Image: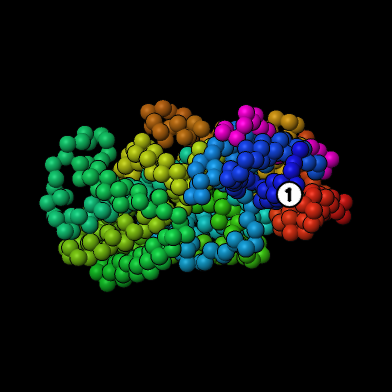
Protein backbone atom coordinates (compact mmCIF):
# COMPACT_ATOMS: atom_id res chain seq x y z
CA UNK A 1 0.00 0.00 0.00
CA UNK A 2 2.82 2.41 0.87
CA UNK A 3 5.55 3.67 -1.34
CA UNK A 4 9.18 3.44 -0.26
CA UNK A 5 9.83 5.61 2.79
CA UNK A 6 6.18 6.60 3.18
CA UNK A 7 5.35 3.92 5.76
CA UNK A 8 8.19 5.16 7.95
CA UNK A 9 7.01 8.82 7.99
CA UNK A 10 3.33 8.00 8.50
CA UNK A 11 4.13 5.49 11.21
CA UNK A 12 6.15 8.04 13.12
CA UNK A 13 3.16 10.43 13.14
CA UNK A 14 0.91 7.69 14.54
CA UNK A 15 3.53 6.51 16.99
CA UNK A 16 3.82 10.02 18.35
CA UNK A 17 0.03 10.24 18.65
CA UNK A 18 -0.05 6.95 20.56
CA UNK A 19 2.86 7.86 22.81
CA UNK A 20 1.48 11.31 23.59
CA UNK A 21 -2.02 9.83 24.00
CA UNK A 22 -3.41 12.47 21.70
CA UNK A 23 -3.20 13.85 18.22
CA UNK A 24 -1.02 16.91 18.69
CA UNK A 25 -0.41 17.76 15.05
CA UNK A 26 -0.80 16.18 11.62
CA UNK A 27 0.78 17.89 8.67
CA UNK A 28 0.65 16.76 5.05
CA UNK A 29 2.60 18.38 2.25
CA UNK A 30 0.83 18.43 -1.09
CA UNK A 31 3.87 19.86 -2.79
CA UNK A 32 4.14 16.65 -4.81
CA UNK A 33 1.72 14.58 -6.79
CA UNK A 34 1.23 11.97 -4.07
CA UNK A 35 0.12 14.38 -1.37
CA UNK A 36 -3.48 13.21 -1.35
CA UNK A 37 -2.41 9.58 -1.42
CA UNK A 38 -0.36 10.20 1.72
CA UNK A 39 -3.47 11.45 3.47
CA UNK A 40 -5.52 8.49 2.28
CA UNK A 41 -2.84 6.06 3.43
CA UNK A 42 -2.72 7.87 6.75
CA UNK A 43 -6.48 7.53 7.22
CA UNK A 44 -6.37 3.82 6.41
CA UNK A 45 -3.48 3.21 8.80
CA UNK A 46 -5.28 5.15 11.51
CA UNK A 47 -8.17 2.69 11.32
CA UNK A 48 -5.83 -0.19 12.07
CA UNK A 49 -6.10 -1.88 15.42
CA UNK A 50 -3.13 -2.13 17.72
CA UNK A 51 -3.23 -4.91 20.32
CA UNK A 52 -2.69 -3.94 23.92
CA UNK A 53 -3.36 -6.15 26.89
CA UNK A 54 -5.21 -8.62 24.78
CA UNK A 55 -7.74 -6.08 23.51
CA UNK A 56 -8.00 -4.18 20.28
CA UNK A 57 -8.20 -0.37 20.22
CA UNK A 58 -8.82 1.65 17.12
CA UNK A 59 -6.77 4.81 17.18
CA UNK A 60 -9.09 6.47 14.74
CA UNK A 61 -12.45 5.84 13.17
CA UNK A 62 -12.51 7.57 9.83
CA UNK A 63 -14.87 8.11 7.00
CA UNK A 64 -12.44 9.52 4.46
CA UNK A 65 -13.79 10.61 1.10
CA UNK A 66 -10.34 11.96 0.37
CA UNK A 67 -8.13 14.53 1.91
CA UNK A 68 -10.30 17.66 1.31
CA UNK A 69 -12.38 16.65 4.33
CA UNK A 70 -11.09 13.92 6.61
CA UNK A 71 -13.60 13.46 9.42
CA UNK A 72 -12.36 11.59 12.43
CA UNK A 73 -12.88 10.69 16.04
CA UNK A 74 -9.81 9.72 17.99
CA UNK A 75 -10.64 7.11 20.59
CA UNK A 76 -7.33 7.91 22.24
CA UNK A 77 -8.62 11.36 23.09
CA UNK A 78 -12.37 11.38 22.55
CA UNK A 79 -14.46 12.62 24.27
CA UNK A 80 -11.97 14.53 26.37
CA UNK A 81 -9.31 14.78 23.76
CA UNK A 82 -9.84 15.42 20.09
CA UNK A 83 -12.89 15.30 17.90
CA UNK A 84 -13.80 17.25 14.82
CA UNK A 85 -13.02 17.52 11.13
CA UNK A 86 -9.50 17.59 9.77
CA UNK A 87 -9.67 19.89 6.77
CA UNK A 88 -6.82 21.34 4.73
CA UNK A 89 -5.85 24.75 6.06
CA UNK A 90 -3.27 26.69 4.17
CA UNK A 91 -0.04 27.02 6.12
CA UNK A 92 2.84 29.36 5.51
CA UNK A 93 4.42 26.99 3.02
CA UNK A 94 1.18 26.41 1.18
CA UNK A 95 0.55 22.88 2.43
CA UNK A 96 -2.59 21.76 4.23
CA UNK A 97 -2.10 21.75 7.98
CA UNK A 98 -4.30 20.62 10.84
CA UNK A 99 -3.18 21.17 14.38
CA UNK A 100 -5.32 19.77 17.17
CA UNK A 101 -4.49 19.39 20.84
CA UNK A 102 -6.03 17.54 23.74
CA UNK A 103 -5.63 17.02 27.47
CA UNK A 104 -2.56 14.86 27.21
CA UNK A 105 -0.21 13.61 29.86
CA UNK A 106 2.96 15.66 30.21
CA UNK A 107 6.46 14.42 29.44
CA UNK A 108 9.16 15.29 31.95
CA UNK A 109 10.63 18.02 29.76
CA UNK A 110 7.42 20.09 29.94
CA UNK A 111 6.92 19.89 33.69
CA UNK A 112 7.73 22.76 36.02
CA UNK A 113 6.96 23.23 39.68
CA UNK A 114 4.43 25.90 40.61
CA UNK A 115 6.11 28.10 43.24
CA UNK A 116 4.53 28.62 46.69
CA UNK A 117 4.28 32.33 45.92
CA UNK A 118 1.60 31.51 43.35
CA UNK A 119 -0.67 29.90 45.95
CA UNK A 120 0.02 32.64 48.49
CA UNK A 121 -0.91 35.32 45.96
CA UNK A 122 -3.97 33.30 44.93
CA UNK A 123 -5.16 33.35 48.55
CA UNK A 124 -5.15 37.15 48.55
CA UNK A 125 -8.60 37.86 47.14
CA UNK A 126 -11.75 39.49 48.41
CA UNK A 127 -13.53 36.15 48.95
CA UNK A 128 -10.92 35.14 51.55
CA UNK A 129 -11.60 38.39 53.40
CA UNK A 130 -15.36 38.07 53.03
CA UNK A 131 -16.06 34.58 54.31
CA UNK A 132 -14.49 35.36 57.69
CA UNK A 133 -15.86 38.84 58.27
CA UNK A 134 -19.28 37.75 56.96
CA UNK A 135 -19.49 35.23 59.82
CA UNK A 136 -19.42 38.10 62.27
CA UNK A 137 -22.14 39.82 60.25
CA UNK A 138 -24.50 36.86 60.74
CA UNK A 139 -23.99 36.54 64.49
CA UNK A 140 -20.77 34.67 65.31
CA UNK A 141 -17.88 36.07 67.32
CA UNK A 142 -14.41 36.76 66.02
CA UNK A 143 -12.90 33.74 67.77
CA UNK A 144 -15.58 31.50 66.29
CA UNK A 145 -14.71 32.77 62.81
CA UNK A 146 -10.99 32.13 63.29
CA UNK A 147 -11.60 28.61 64.62
CA UNK A 148 -13.97 27.77 61.75
CA UNK A 149 -11.46 28.92 59.14
CA UNK A 150 -8.60 26.98 60.73
CA UNK A 151 -10.57 23.74 61.10
CA UNK A 152 -12.11 23.97 57.65
CA UNK A 153 -8.83 24.47 55.83
CA UNK A 154 -7.17 21.79 57.92
CA UNK A 155 -9.85 19.33 56.75
CA UNK A 156 -9.85 20.39 53.10
CA UNK A 157 -6.03 20.38 52.93
CA UNK A 158 -5.97 16.58 53.34
CA UNK A 159 -8.34 16.15 50.40
CA UNK A 160 -6.39 18.64 48.27
CA UNK A 161 -3.12 16.85 49.03
CA UNK A 162 -4.64 13.41 48.38
CA UNK A 163 -6.21 14.26 45.02
CA UNK A 164 -3.27 16.44 44.05
CA UNK A 165 -0.90 13.52 44.51
CA UNK A 166 -2.66 11.70 41.66
CA UNK A 167 -1.75 14.48 39.24
CA UNK A 168 1.82 14.60 40.57
CA UNK A 169 2.20 10.84 39.98
CA UNK A 170 0.45 10.39 36.63
CA UNK A 171 0.74 13.96 35.26
CA UNK A 172 -2.78 14.03 33.83
CA UNK A 173 -5.49 16.66 34.44
CA UNK A 174 -8.70 16.36 36.42
CA UNK A 175 -11.03 15.60 33.46
CA UNK A 176 -8.90 12.59 32.57
CA UNK A 177 -8.37 11.34 36.13
CA UNK A 178 -12.12 11.45 36.71
CA UNK A 179 -12.53 8.68 34.13
CA UNK A 180 -10.86 6.15 36.41
CA UNK A 181 -13.54 6.44 39.10
CA UNK A 182 -16.58 7.63 37.12
CA UNK A 183 -16.01 5.85 33.82
CA UNK A 184 -15.28 7.37 30.44
CA UNK A 185 -18.75 8.88 30.00
CA UNK A 186 -19.64 9.08 33.67
CA UNK A 187 -16.80 11.55 34.19
CA UNK A 188 -19.05 14.12 32.52
CA UNK A 189 -21.02 14.33 35.78
CA UNK A 190 -17.95 15.51 37.66
CA UNK A 191 -16.77 17.76 34.83
CA UNK A 192 -20.11 19.52 34.31
CA UNK A 193 -20.51 20.07 38.07
CA UNK A 194 -17.04 21.52 38.20
CA UNK A 195 -17.38 23.82 35.19
CA UNK A 196 -20.68 25.31 36.39
CA UNK A 197 -19.16 26.25 39.70
CA UNK A 198 -16.02 27.63 38.05
CA UNK A 199 -18.19 29.90 35.91
CA UNK A 200 -20.02 31.18 38.98
CA UNK A 201 -16.78 31.88 40.82
CA UNK A 202 -15.45 33.78 37.82
CA UNK A 203 -18.58 35.91 37.80
CA UNK A 204 -18.40 36.57 41.55
CA UNK A 205 -14.81 37.74 41.27
CA UNK A 206 -15.97 40.05 38.47
CA UNK A 207 -18.33 41.70 40.97
CA UNK A 208 -15.53 42.03 43.52
CA UNK A 209 -13.36 43.60 40.86
CA UNK A 210 -16.21 45.89 39.76
CA UNK A 211 -16.77 47.09 43.32
CA UNK A 212 -13.08 47.91 43.54
CA UNK A 213 -13.22 49.80 40.23
CA UNK A 214 -16.20 51.81 41.50
CA UNK A 215 -14.22 52.79 44.61
CA UNK A 216 -11.22 53.75 42.44
CA UNK A 217 -13.31 55.92 40.12
CA UNK A 218 -15.09 57.45 43.12
CA UNK A 219 -11.74 58.35 44.66
CA UNK A 220 -10.86 60.32 41.52
CA UNK A 221 -14.32 61.66 40.65
CA UNK A 222 -16.52 61.62 43.78
CA UNK A 223 -19.58 62.55 41.70
CA UNK A 224 -19.49 59.06 40.17
CA UNK A 225 -20.63 57.60 43.50
CA UNK A 226 -23.78 59.75 43.42
CA UNK A 227 -24.63 58.93 39.82
CA UNK A 228 -28.40 58.69 39.33
CA UNK A 229 -29.55 55.08 39.48
CA UNK A 230 -31.89 53.90 36.71
CA UNK A 231 -31.77 50.19 37.60
CA UNK A 232 -34.58 48.76 39.80
CA UNK A 233 -33.50 48.22 43.40
CA UNK A 234 -34.50 44.54 43.41
CA UNK A 235 -31.82 43.80 40.77
CA UNK A 236 -29.10 44.12 43.39
CA UNK A 237 -26.92 46.51 41.40
CA UNK A 238 -26.85 50.25 40.69
CA UNK A 239 -26.04 52.17 37.54
CA UNK A 240 -22.53 53.07 38.69
CA UNK A 241 -22.08 49.46 39.77
CA UNK A 242 -23.04 48.20 36.31
CA UNK A 243 -20.72 50.73 34.65
CA UNK A 244 -17.90 49.55 36.93
CA UNK A 245 -18.68 45.92 36.12
CA UNK A 246 -18.46 46.68 32.41
CA UNK A 247 -15.15 48.53 32.84
CA UNK A 248 -13.60 45.70 34.85
CA UNK A 249 -14.85 43.13 32.36
CA UNK A 250 -13.43 45.08 29.41
CA UNK A 251 -10.05 45.49 31.12
CA UNK A 252 -9.99 41.80 32.00
CA UNK A 253 -11.08 40.44 28.62
CA UNK A 254 -7.75 40.92 26.75
CA UNK A 255 -5.98 38.93 29.47
CA UNK A 256 -8.30 36.01 28.74
CA UNK A 257 -6.95 35.94 25.19
CA UNK A 258 -3.31 35.66 26.32
CA UNK A 259 -1.71 32.36 27.30
CA UNK A 260 -1.08 32.26 31.08
CA UNK A 261 2.63 31.55 30.48
CA UNK A 262 2.91 35.07 29.08
CA UNK A 263 1.25 36.62 32.13
CA UNK A 264 3.80 35.68 34.77
CA UNK A 265 4.62 39.35 35.22
CA UNK A 266 1.02 40.00 36.25
CA UNK A 267 1.07 37.28 38.90
CA UNK A 268 4.41 38.55 40.16
CA UNK A 269 3.06 42.10 40.50
CA UNK A 270 0.02 40.75 42.32
CA UNK A 271 2.11 38.63 44.71
CA UNK A 272 4.03 41.77 45.72
CA UNK A 273 1.48 44.60 45.74
CA UNK A 274 -1.60 42.85 47.15
CA UNK A 275 0.06 41.46 50.32
CA UNK A 276 1.62 44.86 51.01
CA UNK A 277 -1.77 46.56 50.72
CA UNK A 278 -3.50 44.01 52.97
CA UNK A 279 -0.83 44.22 55.66
CA UNK A 280 -1.11 48.02 55.51
CA UNK A 281 -4.88 47.74 56.14
CA UNK A 282 -4.14 45.33 59.00
CA UNK A 283 -1.77 47.86 60.58
CA UNK A 284 -4.33 50.65 60.09
CA UNK A 285 -6.96 48.61 61.95
CA UNK A 286 -4.78 48.36 65.04
CA UNK A 287 -3.40 51.90 64.87
CA UNK A 288 -6.74 53.58 64.21
CA UNK A 289 -9.02 51.60 66.51
CA UNK A 290 -6.78 49.02 68.25
CA UNK A 291 -8.62 46.34 66.35
CA UNK A 292 -12.00 47.87 67.13
CA UNK A 293 -12.50 46.16 70.45
CA UNK A 294 -12.09 42.84 68.69
CA UNK A 295 -11.52 40.80 71.83
CA UNK A 296 -14.80 42.01 73.32
CA UNK A 297 -16.98 40.85 70.44
CA UNK A 298 -18.94 37.71 71.23
CA UNK A 299 -21.47 35.61 69.34
CA UNK A 300 -25.00 37.03 69.41
CA UNK A 301 -26.59 33.55 69.09
CA UNK A 302 -26.52 30.60 71.48
CA UNK A 303 -27.73 27.05 71.99
CA UNK A 304 -28.67 24.89 69.03
CA UNK A 305 -28.88 27.91 66.78
CA UNK A 306 -25.22 28.61 67.48
CA UNK A 307 -24.26 24.99 66.72
CA UNK A 308 -26.08 24.89 63.40
CA UNK A 309 -24.71 28.32 62.46
CA UNK A 310 -21.20 27.09 63.30
CA UNK A 311 -21.61 24.08 60.98
CA UNK A 312 -23.22 26.14 58.25
CA UNK A 313 -20.32 28.59 58.20
CA UNK A 314 -17.84 25.73 58.20
CA UNK A 315 -19.54 24.39 55.07
CA UNK A 316 -19.26 27.84 53.51
CA UNK A 317 -15.53 28.01 54.17
CA UNK A 318 -15.02 24.48 52.86
CA UNK A 319 -16.81 25.59 49.71
CA UNK A 320 -14.18 28.25 49.12
CA UNK A 321 -11.51 25.67 48.26
CA UNK A 322 -13.76 22.68 47.55
CA UNK A 323 -13.07 23.26 43.88
CA UNK A 324 -9.33 22.77 44.39
CA UNK A 325 -9.99 19.56 46.30
CA UNK A 326 -11.41 18.20 43.05
CA UNK A 327 -9.14 19.65 40.35
CA UNK A 328 -5.82 20.07 42.15
CA UNK A 329 -4.35 17.67 39.58
CA UNK A 330 -4.77 20.39 36.95
CA UNK A 331 -1.88 22.11 38.71
CA UNK A 332 0.03 19.23 40.34
CA UNK A 333 0.40 17.46 36.98
CA UNK A 334 3.20 19.93 36.18
CA UNK A 335 5.21 18.90 39.24
CA UNK A 336 8.72 17.55 38.82
CA UNK A 337 9.08 16.54 42.46
CA UNK A 338 7.67 13.58 44.35
CA UNK A 339 3.99 13.50 45.27
CA UNK A 340 4.98 13.73 48.94
CA UNK A 341 5.41 17.47 48.44
CA UNK A 342 1.63 17.70 48.23
CA UNK A 343 1.66 17.18 51.99
CA UNK A 344 2.87 20.77 52.34
CA UNK A 345 -0.71 21.87 51.78
CA UNK A 346 -1.76 20.40 55.12
CA UNK A 347 0.11 22.95 57.27
CA UNK A 348 0.34 25.70 54.64
CA UNK A 349 -3.34 26.23 53.80
CA UNK A 350 -4.67 26.52 57.39
CA UNK A 351 -1.89 28.92 58.39
CA UNK A 352 -2.14 31.22 55.37
CA UNK A 353 -5.92 31.39 55.17
CA UNK A 354 -6.41 31.77 58.91
CA UNK A 355 -4.02 34.72 58.93
CA UNK A 356 -5.68 36.37 55.91
CA UNK A 357 -9.10 35.82 57.42
CA UNK A 358 -7.90 37.37 60.66
CA UNK A 359 -6.89 40.47 58.68
CA UNK A 360 -10.45 40.70 57.35
CA UNK A 361 -11.92 40.23 60.83
CA UNK A 362 -9.72 42.86 62.46
CA UNK A 363 -10.25 45.40 59.67
CA UNK A 364 -14.02 44.86 59.62
CA UNK A 365 -14.20 45.18 63.40
CA UNK A 366 -12.15 48.38 63.31
CA UNK A 367 -14.38 49.75 60.55
CA UNK A 368 -17.53 49.17 62.58
CA UNK A 369 -16.00 50.78 65.66
CA UNK A 370 -14.80 53.82 63.73
CA UNK A 371 -17.70 54.44 61.34
CA UNK A 372 -20.61 52.76 63.12
CA UNK A 373 -23.43 50.81 61.53
CA UNK A 374 -23.26 47.12 60.65
CA UNK A 375 -20.02 45.21 60.25
CA UNK A 376 -18.49 46.09 56.84
CA UNK A 377 -17.98 42.46 55.74
CA UNK A 378 -17.24 43.66 52.20
CA UNK A 379 -13.75 45.26 52.18
CA UNK A 380 -14.82 47.85 49.59
CA UNK A 381 -17.51 49.10 51.99
CA UNK A 382 -14.79 49.64 54.56
CA UNK A 383 -12.44 51.39 52.14
CA UNK A 384 -15.21 53.70 50.92
CA UNK A 385 -15.37 55.30 54.37
CA UNK A 386 -11.77 56.50 54.32
CA UNK A 387 -11.26 60.24 54.03
CA UNK A 388 -8.02 60.00 52.04
CA UNK A 389 -8.87 59.67 48.37
CA UNK A 390 -5.36 58.40 47.55
CA UNK A 391 -5.64 55.64 50.14
CA UNK A 392 -9.05 54.68 48.83
CA UNK A 393 -7.73 54.45 45.28
CA UNK A 394 -4.66 52.33 45.98
CA UNK A 395 -6.43 50.03 48.45
CA UNK A 396 -9.25 49.47 45.96
CA UNK A 397 -6.68 48.90 43.22
CA UNK A 398 -5.16 46.05 45.26
CA UNK A 399 -8.55 44.31 45.43
CA UNK A 400 -9.17 44.85 41.71
CA UNK A 401 -5.76 43.38 40.95
CA UNK A 402 -6.48 40.45 43.27
CA UNK A 403 -9.78 39.73 41.50
CA UNK A 404 -8.12 39.97 38.09
CA UNK A 405 -5.29 37.64 39.08
CA UNK A 406 -7.43 34.94 40.65
CA UNK A 407 -9.88 35.03 37.74
CA UNK A 408 -7.14 34.43 35.21
CA UNK A 409 -4.98 31.98 37.16
CA UNK A 410 -7.72 29.87 38.73
CA UNK A 411 -11.33 30.44 37.67
CA UNK A 412 -11.11 31.02 33.92
CA UNK A 413 -8.39 28.39 33.43
CA UNK A 414 -10.33 25.77 35.37
CA UNK A 415 -13.49 26.55 33.42
CA UNK A 416 -11.57 26.52 30.12
CA UNK A 417 -10.00 23.13 30.90
CA UNK A 418 -13.41 21.63 31.59
CA UNK A 419 -15.05 23.25 28.56
CA UNK A 420 -12.21 21.94 26.40
CA UNK A 421 -12.86 18.49 27.82
CA UNK A 422 -16.55 18.71 26.98
CA UNK A 423 -16.12 19.93 23.39
CA UNK A 424 -12.49 19.37 22.38
CA UNK A 425 -13.19 19.62 18.67
CA UNK A 426 -14.43 23.18 19.01
CA UNK A 427 -13.00 24.65 22.23
CA UNK A 428 -9.38 25.16 23.18
CA UNK A 429 -7.92 26.92 26.21
CA UNK A 430 -8.27 30.43 24.80
CA UNK A 431 -11.79 29.90 23.49
CA UNK A 432 -12.78 28.35 26.81
CA UNK A 433 -11.59 31.40 28.71
CA UNK A 434 -13.44 33.71 26.33
CA UNK A 435 -16.64 31.67 26.69
CA UNK A 436 -16.22 31.84 30.46
CA UNK A 437 -15.97 35.62 30.27
CA UNK A 438 -19.06 35.95 28.09
CA UNK A 439 -21.20 33.61 30.18
CA UNK A 440 -20.42 35.55 33.37
CA UNK A 441 -22.93 38.22 32.35
CA UNK A 442 -25.81 35.77 32.31
CA UNK A 443 -25.17 34.57 35.88
CA UNK A 444 -26.13 37.94 37.48
CA UNK A 445 -23.48 37.47 40.18
CA UNK A 446 -24.21 40.81 41.85
CA UNK A 447 -27.31 39.24 43.39
CA UNK A 448 -25.14 36.67 45.15
CA UNK A 449 -23.05 39.36 46.83
CA UNK A 450 -25.90 41.68 47.77
CA UNK A 451 -25.71 40.46 51.40
CA UNK A 452 -23.56 38.35 53.68
CA UNK A 453 -26.33 35.75 53.92
CA UNK A 454 -26.57 35.36 50.15
CA UNK A 455 -22.82 35.00 49.88
CA UNK A 456 -22.66 32.29 52.54
CA UNK A 457 -25.60 30.45 50.96
CA UNK A 458 -23.81 30.39 47.65
CA UNK A 459 -20.65 29.06 49.30
CA UNK A 460 -22.65 26.26 50.93
CA UNK A 461 -24.41 25.34 47.68
CA UNK A 462 -21.02 25.31 46.00
CA UNK A 463 -19.74 22.73 48.47
CA UNK A 464 -22.49 20.11 48.55
CA UNK A 465 -21.78 18.94 45.00
CA UNK A 466 -17.99 19.00 45.10
CA UNK A 467 -17.67 17.17 48.43
CA UNK A 468 -19.07 13.90 47.03
CA UNK A 469 -17.01 14.22 43.83
CA UNK A 470 -13.80 14.75 45.81
CA UNK A 471 -14.59 11.80 48.07
CA UNK A 472 -15.17 9.41 45.16
CA UNK A 473 -11.92 10.37 43.45
CA UNK A 474 -9.89 10.26 46.68
CA UNK A 475 -11.01 6.82 47.87
CA UNK A 476 -11.01 5.35 44.38
CA UNK A 477 -7.28 6.03 44.00
CA UNK A 478 -5.99 5.40 47.51
CA UNK A 479 -8.28 2.58 48.68
CA UNK A 480 -10.03 0.75 45.84
CA UNK A 481 -7.43 0.99 43.05
CA UNK A 482 -4.49 0.92 45.47
CA UNK A 483 -2.76 3.80 43.64
CA UNK A 484 -2.58 1.83 40.36
CA UNK A 485 -4.05 3.43 37.24
CA UNK A 486 -3.56 2.51 33.61
CA UNK A 487 -2.62 5.85 32.06
CA UNK A 488 -2.97 4.64 28.48
CA UNK A 489 -6.46 3.22 29.12
CA UNK A 490 -7.59 6.60 30.49
CA UNK A 491 -7.23 7.98 26.96
CA UNK A 492 -8.90 5.10 25.13
CA UNK A 493 -12.66 5.20 24.88
CA UNK A 494 -13.03 1.58 23.77
CA UNK A 495 -10.65 0.15 26.35
CA UNK A 496 -12.49 -2.20 28.70
CA UNK A 497 -10.44 -1.10 31.74
CA UNK A 498 -12.51 1.99 32.50
CA UNK A 499 -15.48 1.03 30.33
CA UNK A 500 -17.35 -0.34 33.36
CA UNK A 501 -19.34 -2.98 31.54
CA UNK A 502 -19.27 -1.24 28.19
CA UNK A 503 -21.48 1.68 29.21
CA UNK A 504 -18.60 3.91 30.19
CA UNK A 505 -20.38 4.85 33.42
CA UNK A 506 -19.46 3.55 36.86
CA UNK A 507 -22.89 3.13 38.42
CA UNK A 508 -21.30 2.73 41.86
CA UNK A 509 -20.00 6.31 41.71
CA UNK A 510 -23.36 7.61 40.49
CA UNK A 511 -25.25 5.88 43.31
CA UNK A 512 -22.80 7.17 45.92
CA UNK A 513 -23.02 10.69 44.48
CA UNK A 514 -26.83 10.69 44.70
CA UNK A 515 -26.69 9.40 48.29
CA UNK A 516 -24.33 12.22 49.24
CA UNK A 517 -26.22 15.03 47.51
CA UNK A 518 -29.88 14.09 48.06
CA UNK A 519 -30.07 14.86 51.83
CA UNK A 520 -28.86 18.40 51.12
CA UNK A 521 -31.45 19.24 48.47
CA UNK A 522 -34.27 20.36 50.85
CA UNK A 523 -31.92 22.82 52.53
CA UNK A 524 -30.66 24.02 49.17
CA UNK A 525 -34.23 24.67 48.01
CA UNK A 526 -34.92 26.61 51.20
CA UNK A 527 -31.79 28.72 50.77
CA UNK A 528 -32.89 29.64 47.25
CA UNK A 529 -36.48 30.39 48.30
CA UNK A 530 -36.94 30.93 52.03
CA UNK A 531 -40.72 30.87 51.62
CA UNK A 532 -40.53 27.11 51.06
CA UNK A 533 -40.58 25.54 54.52
CA UNK A 534 -38.63 22.28 54.71
CA UNK A 535 -38.58 21.98 58.51
CA UNK A 536 -35.65 19.99 59.91
CA UNK A 537 -34.68 19.16 56.32
CA UNK A 538 -32.60 22.32 56.34
CA UNK A 539 -30.09 20.91 58.83
CA UNK A 540 -28.25 18.41 56.56
CA UNK A 541 -27.57 21.28 54.18
CA UNK A 542 -25.94 23.25 56.98
CA UNK A 543 -23.06 20.76 57.09
CA UNK A 544 -23.48 19.69 53.48
CA UNK A 545 -19.84 19.27 52.48
CA UNK A 546 -18.98 17.08 55.46
CA UNK A 547 -22.15 15.02 55.06
CA UNK A 548 -21.74 14.63 51.32
CA UNK A 549 -18.04 13.77 51.51
CA UNK A 550 -18.39 11.19 54.30
CA UNK A 551 -21.65 9.60 53.11
CA UNK A 552 -20.55 9.38 49.49
CA UNK A 553 -17.10 8.01 50.33
CA UNK A 554 -18.56 5.36 52.63
CA UNK A 555 -21.25 4.25 50.16
CA UNK A 556 -18.81 4.22 47.25
CA UNK A 557 -16.25 2.08 49.04
CA UNK A 558 -18.81 -0.39 50.40
CA UNK A 559 -20.71 -0.78 47.11
CA UNK A 560 -17.44 -1.15 45.18
CA UNK A 561 -16.26 -3.88 47.55
CA UNK A 562 -19.57 -5.76 47.39
CA UNK A 563 -19.91 -5.33 43.59
CA UNK A 564 -16.30 -4.90 42.44
CA UNK A 565 -15.51 -3.59 38.97
CA UNK A 566 -12.77 -6.15 38.35
CA UNK A 567 -11.93 -4.88 34.88
CA UNK A 568 -10.83 -1.53 36.37
CA UNK A 569 -8.38 -3.14 38.80
CA UNK A 570 -4.95 -3.35 37.16
CA UNK A 571 -2.15 -5.52 38.50
CA UNK A 572 0.60 -3.09 37.56
CA UNK A 573 0.30 0.68 37.14
CA UNK A 574 1.05 1.95 33.64
CA UNK A 575 2.97 5.20 34.02
CA UNK A 576 3.20 7.89 31.33
CA UNK A 577 7.02 7.84 31.45
CA UNK A 578 7.03 4.23 30.27
CA UNK A 579 5.13 5.09 27.12
CA UNK A 580 7.44 8.00 26.35
CA UNK A 581 10.45 5.74 26.97
CA UNK A 582 8.93 3.16 24.63
CA UNK A 583 8.79 5.74 21.89
CA UNK A 584 12.47 6.55 22.38
CA UNK A 585 13.32 2.84 22.16
CA UNK A 586 11.54 2.49 18.82
CA UNK A 587 13.13 0.01 16.40
CA UNK A 588 15.09 1.45 13.53
CA UNK A 589 12.61 0.13 10.97
CA UNK A 590 9.74 2.10 12.51
CA UNK A 591 7.73 -0.97 13.49
CA UNK A 592 5.46 -1.12 16.49
CA UNK A 593 7.25 -4.14 17.91
CA UNK A 594 9.51 -2.36 20.38
CA UNK A 595 6.75 -0.20 21.86
CA UNK A 596 4.36 -3.12 22.18
CA UNK A 597 7.16 -5.23 23.61
CA UNK A 598 7.90 -2.70 26.33
CA UNK A 599 4.25 -2.48 27.31
CA UNK A 600 3.86 -6.24 27.37
CA UNK A 601 7.02 -6.61 29.46
CA UNK A 602 5.54 -4.13 31.94
CA UNK A 603 2.26 -6.04 32.19
CA UNK A 604 3.93 -9.44 32.50
CA UNK A 605 6.56 -8.30 35.05
Label 1 environment density (alpha carbons within 10 Å; few <14, some 14–19, many ≥20):
few
Examine the image and state in which quarter residue 217 appears. Answer: bottom left
Any part of residue 94 in sight: yes
Q: Identify the coloring.
A: rainbow
Nearest the viewer among 79 and 9 is: 9
Disc tally is: 1
Identify the residue position indicated by label 1 in the image: 5
Examine the image and state in which quarter residue 516 appears. Answer: top right
Nearest the viewer among 485 and 73 is: 73
Tell whether position 56 is magenta.
yes
| Residue appearing at x 81%, y 41% in the figure | 51
Q: Is residue 129 above or below residue 466?
A: below
Residue 196: % across, % down = 47, 39
Tell whether position 331 is magenta.
no
> Quarter of the image containing the C terminus?
bottom right
Q: Element at badge 1?
A: loop
Residue 59: % across, % down = 70, 39
Nearest the viewer among 112 and 124 is: 112
| Residue appearing at x 31%, y 47% in the figure | 249
| Residue appearing at x 67%, y 54% in the figure | 170
| Residue appearing at x 64%, y 46% in the figure | 22
Any part of residue 192 in sight: no
**Bounds of the magenta segment:** 53-69
Nearest the viewer among 88 and 454 is: 88
Residue 60: % across, % down = 68, 37
Q: Is residue 479 left or right of residue 370?
A: right
Q: Looking at the image, which residue sits at the far front?
A: 33
Residue 553: % across, % down = 66, 43
> Quarter of the image containing the N terminus?
top right
Q: Is residue 378 above or below residue 553?
A: below
Amino acid sequence: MFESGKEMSIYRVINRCLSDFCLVAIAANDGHEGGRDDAADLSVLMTSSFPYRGTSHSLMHTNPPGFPSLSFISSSCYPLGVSGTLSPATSDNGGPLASLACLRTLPDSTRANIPPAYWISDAFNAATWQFASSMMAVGLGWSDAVIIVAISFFIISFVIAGNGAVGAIYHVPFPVIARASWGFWGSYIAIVSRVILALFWFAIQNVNGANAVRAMIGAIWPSFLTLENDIPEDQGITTNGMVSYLIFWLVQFPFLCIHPNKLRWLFMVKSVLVPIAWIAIFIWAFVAESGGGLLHQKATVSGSKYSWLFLANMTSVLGNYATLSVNQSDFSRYSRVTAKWQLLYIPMLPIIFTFLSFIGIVASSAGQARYGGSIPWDPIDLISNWSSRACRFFAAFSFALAALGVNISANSLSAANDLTALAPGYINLRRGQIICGLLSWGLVPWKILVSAGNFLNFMSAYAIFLGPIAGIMLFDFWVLKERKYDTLALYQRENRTYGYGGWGVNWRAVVAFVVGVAPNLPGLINSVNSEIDVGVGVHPYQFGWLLGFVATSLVYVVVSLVFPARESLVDVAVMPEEVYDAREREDGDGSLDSQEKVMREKVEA
